[in-house]
Image (tube, rainbow, N blue to C red):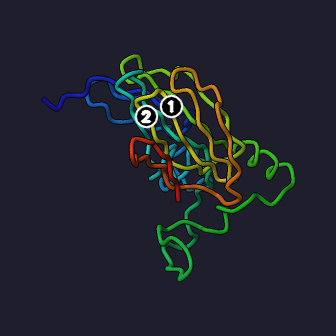
Amino acid sequence: TGEFLSGKNYVYQNWANGLDPLTGRPIYNPDGLYTLNGKFWYGIPGPLGAHNFMAMAYSPKTHLVYIPAHQIPFGYKNQVGGFKPHADSWNVGLDMTKNGLPDTPEARTAYIKDLHGWLLAWDPVKMETVWKIDHKGPWNGGVLATGGDLLFQGLANGEFHAYDATNGSDLYKFDAQSGIIAPPMTYSVNGKQYVAVE
Protein backbone atom coordinates (compact mmCIF):
# COMPACT_ATOMS: atom_id res chain seq x y z
CA THR A 1 0.00 0.00 0.00
CA GLY A 2 3.05 2.24 -0.06
CA GLU A 3 3.33 3.21 3.59
CA PHE A 4 6.74 3.17 5.29
CA LEU A 5 7.25 0.00 7.34
CA SER A 6 10.82 0.15 8.57
CA GLY A 7 14.38 0.87 7.57
CA LYS A 8 17.85 0.37 8.92
CA ASN A 9 21.28 1.07 7.45
CA TYR A 10 23.49 -1.97 6.86
CA VAL A 11 26.77 -0.01 7.12
CA TYR A 12 27.93 3.00 9.12
CA GLN A 13 26.80 6.40 7.85
CA ASN A 14 27.13 9.88 9.30
CA TRP A 15 24.83 12.10 7.20
CA ALA A 16 21.52 11.19 8.90
CA ASN A 17 20.47 10.82 12.53
CA GLY A 18 17.80 8.24 11.76
CA LEU A 19 14.55 7.95 9.83
CA ASP A 20 11.21 9.61 10.41
CA PRO A 21 9.03 6.74 11.71
CA LEU A 22 5.98 7.95 9.75
CA THR A 23 7.46 8.86 6.38
CA GLY A 24 10.77 7.00 6.30
CA ARG A 25 12.52 10.19 5.20
CA PRO A 26 16.01 10.75 6.62
CA ILE A 27 16.52 13.04 9.59
CA TYR A 28 19.55 14.95 8.33
CA ASN A 29 22.61 15.56 10.46
CA PRO A 30 22.86 19.39 10.48
CA ASP A 31 26.66 19.19 10.17
CA GLY A 32 26.23 17.38 6.85
CA LEU A 33 24.27 20.21 5.23
CA TYR A 34 27.42 21.67 3.69
CA THR A 35 25.50 23.60 1.03
CA LEU A 36 23.73 25.54 3.79
CA ASN A 37 26.44 25.95 6.41
CA GLY A 38 29.40 26.42 4.02
CA LYS A 39 31.62 24.07 6.02
CA PHE A 40 33.70 21.13 4.83
CA TRP A 41 31.88 17.82 5.33
CA TYR A 42 33.59 14.42 5.52
CA GLY A 43 30.73 12.21 4.41
CA ILE A 44 30.44 8.47 4.94
CA PRO A 45 29.46 6.91 2.67
CA GLY A 46 30.39 9.20 -0.19
CA PRO A 47 28.51 9.53 -3.48
CA LEU A 48 29.43 5.97 -4.47
CA GLY A 49 27.11 4.80 -1.71
CA ALA A 50 27.47 1.82 0.59
CA HIS A 51 26.62 -0.42 -2.37
CA ASN A 52 26.86 0.53 -6.02
CA PHE A 53 26.03 -1.25 -9.28
CA MET A 54 27.72 -4.53 -8.32
CA ALA A 55 24.99 -7.16 -8.21
CA MET A 56 23.80 -8.39 -4.86
CA ALA A 57 22.11 -11.77 -4.51
CA TYR A 58 19.27 -13.37 -2.56
CA SER A 59 19.00 -17.02 -1.54
CA PRO A 60 15.48 -18.42 -1.03
CA LYS A 61 17.13 -21.23 0.95
CA THR A 62 18.95 -19.09 3.53
CA HIS A 63 16.52 -16.14 3.23
CA LEU A 64 19.55 -13.84 3.24
CA VAL A 65 20.59 -11.00 0.95
CA TYR A 66 24.29 -10.94 0.06
CA ILE A 67 25.55 -7.39 -0.42
CA PRO A 68 28.95 -6.35 -1.80
CA ALA A 69 29.17 -3.32 0.48
CA HIS A 70 31.87 -0.69 0.84
CA GLN A 71 32.81 2.46 2.68
CA ILE A 72 34.46 5.17 0.60
CA PRO A 73 34.45 8.58 2.32
CA PHE A 74 34.15 11.81 0.37
CA GLY A 75 35.01 15.40 1.14
CA TYR A 76 32.23 17.91 0.42
CA LYS A 77 32.95 21.64 0.14
CA ASN A 78 31.08 24.22 -1.94
CA GLN A 79 32.89 26.01 -4.72
CA VAL A 80 33.93 29.50 -3.64
CA GLY A 81 32.07 32.22 -5.54
CA GLY A 82 29.27 29.98 -6.83
CA PHE A 83 29.08 27.26 -9.45
CA LYS A 84 31.81 27.09 -12.09
CA PRO A 85 31.82 24.23 -14.64
CA HIS A 86 34.90 22.00 -14.90
CA ALA A 87 35.61 19.92 -17.99
CA ASP A 88 37.21 16.97 -16.20
CA SER A 89 35.11 16.45 -13.08
CA TRP A 90 31.63 16.13 -11.71
CA ASN A 91 29.79 19.40 -12.15
CA VAL A 92 27.84 19.43 -8.91
CA GLY A 93 29.03 22.71 -7.40
CA LEU A 94 31.74 21.14 -5.24
CA ASP A 95 35.33 22.21 -4.80
CA MET A 96 36.80 19.07 -6.35
CA THR A 97 40.24 19.80 -4.86
CA LYS A 98 38.76 18.77 -1.49
CA ASN A 99 37.78 15.27 -2.68
CA GLY A 100 41.16 13.60 -3.13
CA LEU A 101 43.49 12.39 -0.45
CA PRO A 102 43.91 14.94 2.35
CA ASP A 103 47.02 17.15 2.48
CA THR A 104 48.56 16.01 5.76
CA PRO A 105 50.00 12.52 6.41
CA GLU A 106 47.80 12.15 9.50
CA ALA A 107 44.62 12.96 7.59
CA ARG A 108 45.65 10.65 4.72
CA THR A 109 46.21 7.82 7.18
CA ALA A 110 42.78 8.43 8.75
CA TYR A 111 41.13 8.49 5.31
CA ILE A 112 42.79 5.23 4.24
CA LYS A 113 41.68 3.61 7.51
CA ASP A 114 38.11 4.58 6.60
CA LEU A 115 38.26 2.66 3.28
CA HIS A 116 36.53 -0.71 3.64
CA GLY A 117 34.99 -3.45 1.56
CA TRP A 118 32.79 -6.27 2.80
CA LEU A 119 30.54 -9.07 1.74
CA LEU A 120 27.52 -8.84 4.06
CA ALA A 121 24.92 -11.53 4.65
CA TRP A 122 21.87 -9.43 5.57
CA ASP A 123 18.64 -10.71 7.08
CA PRO A 124 15.98 -8.46 5.48
CA VAL A 125 13.31 -9.44 8.02
CA LYS A 126 15.35 -8.87 11.18
CA MET A 127 17.32 -6.07 9.44
CA GLU A 128 20.65 -7.26 10.78
CA THR A 129 23.96 -8.61 9.53
CA VAL A 130 24.17 -12.37 10.05
CA TRP A 131 27.83 -12.61 9.02
CA LYS A 132 30.34 -10.52 7.10
CA ILE A 133 33.65 -10.96 5.33
CA ASP A 134 36.18 -8.14 5.51
CA HIS A 135 37.89 -7.56 2.17
CA LYS A 136 41.26 -5.87 1.62
CA GLY A 137 39.61 -2.80 0.13
CA PRO A 138 36.42 -1.36 -1.42
CA TRP A 139 34.83 -1.62 -4.87
CA ASN A 140 34.57 -5.40 -5.17
CA GLY A 141 32.54 -7.47 -7.60
CA GLY A 142 28.95 -8.61 -7.64
CA VAL A 143 27.70 -11.79 -6.00
CA LEU A 144 26.17 -15.02 -7.30
CA ALA A 145 24.17 -17.28 -4.95
CA THR A 146 23.46 -20.86 -6.04
CA GLY A 147 20.96 -23.51 -4.97
CA GLY A 148 23.86 -25.49 -3.51
CA ASP A 149 24.40 -22.88 -0.77
CA LEU A 150 27.44 -21.43 -2.51
CA LEU A 151 28.32 -17.79 -3.07
CA PHE A 152 30.79 -16.61 -5.68
CA GLN A 153 32.44 -13.20 -5.71
CA GLY A 154 35.43 -11.60 -7.41
CA LEU A 155 37.42 -8.87 -5.71
CA ALA A 156 39.13 -5.70 -6.86
CA ASN A 157 42.52 -7.25 -6.05
CA GLY A 158 41.92 -10.14 -8.50
CA GLU A 159 40.90 -12.83 -6.03
CA PHE A 160 37.91 -15.01 -6.96
CA HIS A 161 36.19 -16.74 -4.04
CA ALA A 162 33.58 -19.38 -3.35
CA TYR A 163 31.94 -19.04 0.07
CA ASP A 164 29.50 -21.09 2.12
CA ALA A 165 26.24 -19.11 1.93
CA THR A 166 25.18 -20.20 5.42
CA ASN A 167 28.21 -18.95 7.36
CA GLY A 168 30.65 -17.19 4.99
CA SER A 169 33.39 -19.81 5.20
CA ASP A 170 35.91 -19.36 2.39
CA LEU A 171 35.79 -22.63 0.43
CA TYR A 172 37.89 -21.77 -2.62
CA LYS A 173 40.17 -18.98 -3.84
CA PHE A 174 41.64 -18.38 -7.29
CA ASP A 175 44.00 -15.56 -8.30
CA ALA A 176 42.62 -14.15 -11.57
CA GLN A 177 45.47 -11.59 -11.65
CA SER A 178 43.07 -8.82 -12.62
CA GLY A 179 40.42 -6.92 -10.68
CA ILE A 180 36.95 -8.47 -10.87
CA ILE A 181 33.95 -6.15 -10.69
CA ALA A 182 31.33 -7.99 -12.76
CA PRO A 183 29.16 -10.60 -11.03
CA PRO A 184 29.83 -14.27 -11.73
CA MET A 185 27.29 -16.36 -13.63
CA THR A 186 26.63 -20.07 -13.79
CA TYR A 187 25.55 -22.42 -16.56
CA SER A 188 25.35 -26.14 -17.24
CA VAL A 189 26.68 -28.23 -20.15
CA ASN A 190 25.83 -31.94 -20.38
CA GLY A 191 24.83 -31.99 -16.73
CA LYS A 192 28.03 -30.34 -15.47
CA GLN A 193 27.74 -26.95 -13.80
CA TYR A 194 30.25 -24.20 -14.52
CA VAL A 195 30.91 -20.75 -13.09
CA ALA A 196 32.24 -17.94 -15.26
CA VAL A 197 33.24 -14.37 -14.59
CA GLU A 198 34.48 -11.56 -16.79
Pick whichever, 34 or 147, lies toward us. Answer: 147
Looking at the image, the residue that sits furthest to the front is 190
Pointers 2 and 1 in contact (C-beta within 8 Å): yes
Say which amino acid is labelled 1.
Answer: Leu
Q: Is residue 108 left or right of residue 15?
A: right
x and y percentages locating residue 186 in the rendered image: 43, 46
Residue 41 lies, with reference to residue 5, above or below; the image says below
Horizontal and vertical percent position of residue 65 = 42, 30
Q: Residues within 10 Å of mark 2 (few under 14, many from 20)?
A: some
Residue 146 sits in quarter: top left
**Secondary structure at numbered mark 1:** strand
* Front one among 80 and 28: 28
Above or below: residue 104 compared with residue 169: below
Which residue is rendered at x = 31% and y = 31% of the image? 24
Residue 58 at x, y percent in the picture: 39, 33
Amino acid at circle 2: Thr
Q: Which residue is mark 1?
A: 150
Identify the disc placed on residue 146.
2
Left or right, residue 116 beside residue 142 = right
Q: List the single residue furthest toward the left.
A: 1
Distance from label 2 to label 1 (Cα)?
Answer: 5 Å
Q: Position of residue 128 (x, y in %)?
A: 48, 20
